Structure formats: C-alpha cells, structure tokens
Image (tube, rainbow, N blue to C red):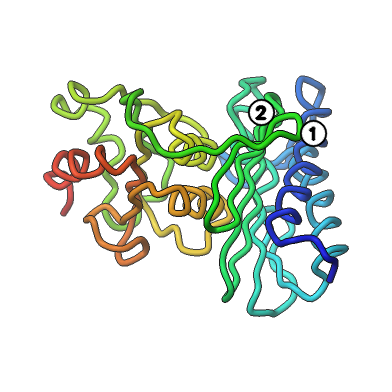
Amino acid sequence: MSDLRDVEVAIKAAEAGAAVVRQKFGGALTRYDKSATDFATEADLEAERAILAVIQAERPDDAVIGEEYGASGEAERTWLVDPLCGTLNFAAQNPLFSVNVALQSPTGDVAAVAQPLTGEIFWTDGTTVAVRKDGIDSPAAPDATSRMVNVDIDAPPEGDFIGAQLLTDAKLREAFALRVCSTTLILAWVAIGRQAAYITDGNLRDSVHFTAGTILCQAAGATVTDLRGNPLHTTSGLIAAAPETHPHLRTLVTPHLT
C-alpha cells in the first residue's frame, strides 16, 4: 500500500480514466452491445483498465467492482468503478458524462468524480467536499438556487417506478425545472450546488453508477434518502437534494408512491 491518502488514490484513478475518455471523445469507436438500449465502447474498457491499474498499484489488497470487468478480490475495502457514466451521451458527442471512482471502507468512504471535458474533479474524503481544477481545490456545498431537478427515467422498474409520472406532474413542473441527464455527474452537481436535486427509482445499493455521487452528496451535507424519506437503501429509489429543497420534493413525490 502506498503512502497516498485514499482520496488521492481515488482522484488519481479518476484522472487516469478521464484522460482516456478525453482522448477518445469525438473519434470513431467500436461498440459492444449489452442490451437493445445499452452498450459499451472501447473508451469504457480502456478507461476502466487505466483506473484499475492505479488502484492495483496503490491498493493491491483491496477488492474492486467495475462496470465493465466485474468484481475481483475479497476485502473489507471495496472500490466501485464506473469508467464512463453516460456512455450514450459520450457516443453521441454530448459532453455530459463522467468517470466515477468510490471506496467503501469500514474507516470511511471516499469518492472522486471526473468531468473529462472540463478538467474538473469533484472529490470528498468523507468530510471535505471540493472541486479540483488545474490543481487548485475550491470548497463546495449544496445550493438550491438553480431550482433544477433531474428526474431519472432510465432506472430499472423495481419498486416505485415513478420517473415518467414525475415528469408530467403539474405541481412539480411548476415548482422546479426538470432535467434528465447522466447519473453521478448530476449527483456531483447536487453536492457542489450546481443542481438543486436528483430523483431516481430502483435498488442502488453498491451500484457503480451511484455510489460515488451519493458519497459526495452525503459528505457535502445534502439530504439523501430513499423515495419515502427513509435512510438511503431502506426501500427503493433516491432523493438527493439541497436541505431546503428536500422537504418540498418529498411532498410532491409522495402521491406517486404505491
């Protein structure tokens, strides 16, 4: 194990993945179908290899769960890796995608989310939350000023599948500007105050798509619960929001729950 702090390992790994994704953006890409509506590209695969190389060099005894190459190792400390969150956007040359690295550890969780085309890293050591740009860290916190709320309609139909219902809810649309976008990138934006909230369905426990973002939000002081307002993972779904926004959203979401 190296002398780097866990959060610096996460940042280093996310930066390694982001460098690959940035280099591949806009070029011809081979696609590897996962389902009728989902696929990976060579950028996903190469970025995950770059991330794994950092983790294996710095924390060789830790376990890893990766989006593309699956799980390896058994340990109390587990890294969750999504090398390209927003592959559909990336392939369409839409810039809204991220590279996600999180560590779940008995001594404290850390996370780093890279936005490759802006050169930003959103990171937390479990206490501090900051945005790193050109080597400079700027502290960040949730903020409801934008009133923009992302409602994820891509989540699997488990439990309360309410995404499509919320998008047509007149009261919700009157109160907030609704958006649909890349998962953890938006959660990172909630953590640093660029987005008011994020809502999704489904079972999110130990998800490579959501863990880094929820760690960031919790460390930043955002309110993070399941759809019913219980602690996250008590039942299905997620509401992550600036503290002053969360109660209003809960009131608007509740009528759609079964």
Residue shown at the point (60%, 27%) measured from the top left: 89
Mark 1 nearby-residue class (10 Å; few <14, some 14–19, many ≥20): few
Q: Secondary structure at mark 1?
A: loop
The percent position of residue 87, horizontal first and vertical second, equals: 64, 35
Quarter holding the N terminus is bottom right
Mark number, residue 90: 2
Type of residue at label 2?
Answer: Phe
Residue shown at the point (35%, 23%) measured from the top left: 146
Residue shown at the point (24%, 34%) measured from the top left: 166
Q: Is residue 197 above or below residue 110?
A: above
The percent position of residue 74, horizontal first and vertical second, equals: 70, 79
Distance Cα–Cα, label 2 vs label 1 = 13 Å
Mark 2 nearby-residue class (10 Å; few <14, some 14–19, many ≥20): many
Taking depth in this image into account, of 182 and 140 the one nearest to the observer is 140
Please tell me in which quadrant of the rendered image residue 249 appears. top left
Circle 1 residue: 30
Residue shown at the point (25%, 39%) measured from the top left: 244
Q: Is residue 159 above or below residue 193?
A: below
Q: Secondary structure at mark 2?
A: helix
Type of residue at label 1?
Answer: Thr
Disc on the earlier residue, 2 or 1: 1
The percent position of residue 241, horizontal first and vertical second, equals: 34, 42
Taking depth in this image into account, of 125 and 182 the one nearest to the observer is 125
Q: Is residue 244 above or below residue 177?
A: below
Query: Are the residues flagged by discs 2 and 1 in contact, CB closer than 8 Å?
Result: no
Please tell me in which quadrant of the rendered image residue 44 appears. top right
Mark number, residue 79: none
Please tell me in which quadrant of the rendered image residue 130 appears. top right
